[in-house]
Image (spheres, rainbow, N blue to C red):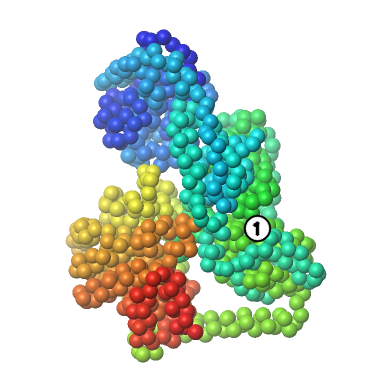
Amino acid sequence: MINILTPVSQGTGVVLKAPLSGYILPLEQVPDPVFAQKMVGDGISIDPISNVLMAPCHGEIIQIHPSYHALTLKTPEGLEVLIHIGLNTVTLRGQGFKPKVKMGDRIQTGDPLIEFDIDYVALHAKSLLTQIVITNSDQVAALIPHSGNVIAGESVILELTLTAKVSENISTSNQTLTSDEIIIPNPAGLHARPSAVLANLAKKYQSKIRLKRGDQDANVKSVVALMGLEVNHGDRVVLIAQGSDAAAAIAELSDAIRSGLGEEGTPPMAAPASIAKLDIAAPPPHRRSDDPNLLLGVAASSGVAVGYTFRVREQEIKVTERGDNPNTERRKLETAIEQAKLEVEALRAKIHGQGDPSKAAIFAAHQELLEDPELMEIATSAIDKGNSAAFAWQQTFTNSAEELAKLHNELLSQRANDVRDVGQRVLRILTGVNSTQPIYPNNTILIAEDLTPSDMANLDRSKVIGFCTVAGGATSHVAILARSMGIPAIAGTEPQVLDLTDGTPVIIDGNKGSLQLNPTATEMEQVKALQIEIAQKRKADVANAMKPAITQDGYQIEVVANIGSKIDAETSVQLGGEGVGLLRTEFIFMDRSSAPTEDEQTEIYSSIAQVLGKEKPLIIRTLDVGGDKPLPYLPIPHEENPFLGERGIRVGFDRPEILRTQLRAILRAAASGNLKILFPMIARLEEIKMAKAMLEEEREKLNTPAVSVGIMVEIPSTAIMAEQFAKEVDFFSIGTNDLTQYTLAMDRGHPKLAPFVDGLNPALLKLIDLTVKEANQQGKWVGVCGGIASDPQAIPLLMGLGVKELSVSVPSIPTIKAQIRELSLVQCQELAQKALNLETGADVRSLVGAAHN
Ligand code: PEP
Ligand code: MG
């Protein structure tokens, strides 16, 4: 926010009245260093007993947080007063808060500003302590805090004397600074990722910051606006910042742009994901074919299939143009956006752990779009002109998407689809229109102008065998999803594909990027023969699924399932699963507004155990949230590095009642089957000792028999100290998803690093080797439940290193059992020893590939 200060003479005094009734606490005593160390500014804190925040003085609302737990007002003298209700209340996402004012409102002392549900906030936030601080404290010569009990709107809490410098400050705090010219080094210009990096850096600053190229400029805090500027490699730009921290902003952002926003010297990001591995030569979109029976496009996902076309049309949502009063409409939009964020978070969580970081990254990008200030600003200004929230939002995102689609930079233009996807999601919430799921015929090749990642997350996989879009390219998120689903896809297809009558027979070739219409019977037969071969292999694997996975030389490997629900457990048993190696209990905690009770959990765990019977193991992992798996009702304060912060068992120690409840539920359910407990994110020996002590305490209280205890080996320290850990537990389950990210120091969801986050990197194999050797020394067994346990190339290596149990994704159980039956353990051991001495993950993969052929 830019200061528009009125010059005042030295000695001008300002008095602030209590915004809430309660007891005054010195700021230093607030249990939050940001306030206690006066990083935000000087002031006081109130332990409140009233629930309507009142204006402490006259002024103007210059900032109101979207979660309504904090606002800033500016006094006529130019002081900026931040009032922050509670601690960590941002995580409540507005729940329990009702704003009574909006940005720009002029207020009088005692006016109601925010009403809040004092019980809800007390129960769900860290503290109710409410801070009143002067954020431009440099303009205060003297500050006298009052103490004791205060009454809202009546008692004085702060007496302030302003400095004479105020008038000088006007020029500095209001100044507009322009950077030197910066030449964009990024080979693909400021496409989505560097734009996101830049926008995130800029959001730290209060100043208004714009990026200017020629006579066009864009709000730097908005990814959408930055992408819309279509800044290319070699373009000359300047930054213009206006506000109190303009100088610092210009300095940091100029440097960041000059050094490539994290990607200088690297080739343009081919795709946000594993496309780098795919060797797809992407021809320009809309290649033309002279053959009327052949439509060309871009190879987006490999594979060939024969099927019948089915055109998908975007659901049209009708909206009314005029709205209620702007306050109500604005709030509707904000609530819908918050709801959309939760939905996207849930989608992210759903695909978490499927071992494909690129998919999670797509939804992370969607979350970024939902926080885009430019989209919000445009929509809000349309609302202020009397439009309904739905109309304003629809116009905003459609225009934005159209602008992006027009850009010449392919990486940028393909993000238009993502804007449309999140836009439609918010619109559906606003209008209450549910997305309708079409009924697809068998062997459907979906034809669409474009498909959104959300469309694809909800596809009927048993019917849809390929897709073909007019928009998009090999780098689109849809292409990434198609690859991860193993479905052939072509994008950027010639537009006449949209004119095909539903049911037209076609061969889709995702390797060549072509759609052959009305193929001859022989051609169809050839493709079908190939498909039949694959299907027969699958059928045979499924038919043999109940047989044990015994190697050619007579060793049995246990093949169990990674599950998240009772339905998964049922399917896993039908597909030959020999138990559950990992029940991710976080799925049981998700999609709800509060944690499941002890009784509810006991019932869920018992019912899963009953599906498996008395013999098959059910390994229940205690709640592993935090990192990229948030729970709305379990707020974890914002962290710079969530993957290195409160996650897994650390959350359990911080909120022992949650962990203890879960342990009691597991112990109570233990009688129903062969239950074992698995603790996640154990990094230090003290942690497993503490977790075991808690378990033992609860067990003694319940007087139930002991259960086996294991830990996830997913942090390098645990693998390195496997000898000591093995003495504490009954088994290890190696979580290669996290072990890989922590060993290589590469975020498992990072789109650019995705091709390198390979669990077959020899560094990982060495850690697995060490873990197994130390466990064996103590007579303990080791399983693997991370994504590589379902990777056919990893199986012989894991077996060769001595892993006894593979906990795999449910659909892959029959195939993996079949693969194991073809292998010889002795040969796997030889192969693993060779792999341990190789240099790179790619070397390891070629070694396995060569051994296979
Ligand atoms: C892992 O880290 O490998 C694992 C199985 O746990 P999650 O993917 O749930 O973090
Ligand atoms: Mg993990």
Identify the residue position indicated by label 1 in the image: 472
The kind of residue tagged 1 is Gly
Q: Is residue 672 above or below residue 641?
A: below
On screen, residue 519 versus residue 767, left or right, reads: right
For label 1, the SS is loop
Q: Using the image as rendered, state which of residue 304 and residue 500 is in the foreground.
A: 304
Name the residue at 44% across, 19% down: 169
Give the residue at x 71% y 80%.
Answer: 524
Q: Is residue 149 above or below residue 712?
A: above
Give the quarter of the image for residue 464: bottom right
* Residue at point 19%, 69% (across, down): 727
* Picture layout, residue 171 above or below residue 725: above
Q: Residue 70 versus residue 173: which sits nearer the camera? A: 173
Tell me what residue is drawn at x 41 percent, y 51 percent.
630
Q: Position of residue 462 (x, y in %)?
A: 59, 71
Query: Residue 717: which quarter of the image?
Result: bottom left
Residue 138 placement, left or right of 446: left
Residue 375, picture quadrant: top right
Residue 80, percent from left and from top: 43, 23
